[in-house]
Amino acid sequence: MGLQTMSSNRLAEGRSFLKWAGGKTRYADKLVALAPAFEGRYFEPFMGSAALFFELGPSDASLSDANPELVICFQQVAHDPEKIMALLDGMPNNRNFYNELRAKSVEEMSDADRAARVIYLNKTGFRGLWRVNKKGQFNVPYGEYDRPYYNRKTLLAASEALRGVEIRHRDFTKALEEAQAGDWVYLDPPYIPLGGWADFKRYTPEQFGEEDQIRLAVAMSEAAERGVFVTMTNSETPLTRAIFKDFRVTRMATRRDINLKSEKRGSWDLVFTSYEIPKGQIADEEESLTLFD
Ligand SMILES: C[S@@+](CC[C@H](N)C(=O)[O-])C[C@H]1O[C@@H](n2cnc3c(N)ncnc32)[C@H](O)[C@@H]1O
């Protein structure tokens, strides 16, 4: 396991079947380069599209998220990808169908139908956002995109990668409590907004606020004290630096894809670690210059 996993990545594709707000597909290789030399289990407690998991391809892993629909989707893709693809093939890409499916009561649907619904909404909804109101109702408008809902090769490879992997609906604290010495936990929470709490934190009915970020810092410290390797990405703000001050920090160059006014803001993410990142593992010059600043 650990670093060996990266060289023996068993995935043909190495990428997710979803496009998630704040997803790390574009930076997954940079983040893998910052991985500790871990021997144990890989945890991703804010899995979203689980971009880093798919890049890494660990055989012993635990993925979890507070979004129950997303969790059911991953479980079903692992269990029966052919069924999910067949269901998607029967779904027309138009506003009426989108609005009907969006409004459907998920409790009355089968798990396979719920999984296909997540992929459909993710590929046809505005900018692939997952946003719910206080009652937990999905409220992203139709996106009018002319694109396939899935790539067969990617979905089958994702299913293969997920087989045998634990996929759970739970709060991030439970995963951090479960992790043991030698395990690696990669945390990618909803970010502290650059200028006020923005829309993209509304992934779940329970919003992720400052007290959750503090809860996260405490749970990370407790795990790190037990010998768990901890890595967390977040926004570059003074509040972020203050809340996670007990960890080593490095900057990673990024481009925010959710915020339309992105050009001037948010060109850096912070990466917090409980371990020292060997300098040789830093991917490019720009980052190595700002290591532990
Ligand atoms: C920034 S996204 C993660 C993106 C992911 N790294 C990727 O590559 O797609 C944050 C995720 O945290 C989840 N989340 C929000 N609050 C949570 C909580 N209290 N516990 C666990 N997951 C939570 C959201 O549902 C969302 O999927």
Image: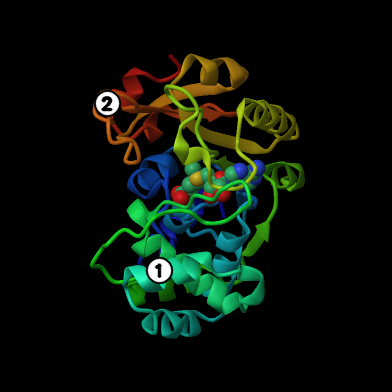
Q: Quick one: 215 or 288, which is closer to the camera?
A: 215
User: Is residue 166 at all visible to an observer of this figure?
Assistant: yes
* Location of residue 19 in the rendering, given as x and y in whole percent from the top left corner: 38, 56
| Type of amino acid at the residue the image marks with label 1 | Tyr
Residue named by callout 1: 98
Residue ID at (66%, 70%): 107
Q: From the viewer's perspective, is residue 239 above or below residue 221?
A: above
Q: Nearer the viewer, residue 4 or 67?
A: 67
The percent coordinates of residue 191 (x first, y second) are 50, 33
Q: Residue at x 32, y 34 (%)?
A: 254
Label 1 CB sits under 8 Å from any ligand 1 atom: no
Left or right of 59 in this view: 256: left
Q: Position of residue 63 (x, y in %)?
A: 60, 56
Judge whether 287 appears above or below 231 on screen.
above
**CB at disc 2 and ligand 1 closer than 8 Å:** no
Image-based side of 250 in relation to 211, left or right: left
Among numbered discs 2 and 1, the one appearing first in the sequence: 1
Q: Which residue is mark 2?
A: 285
Three-letter amino acid code of the residue under disc 2: Glu
Q: Quadrant of the C terminus?
A: top left
The one nearer the camera, 61 or 168, is 168
Q: Quadrant of residue 261?
A: top left
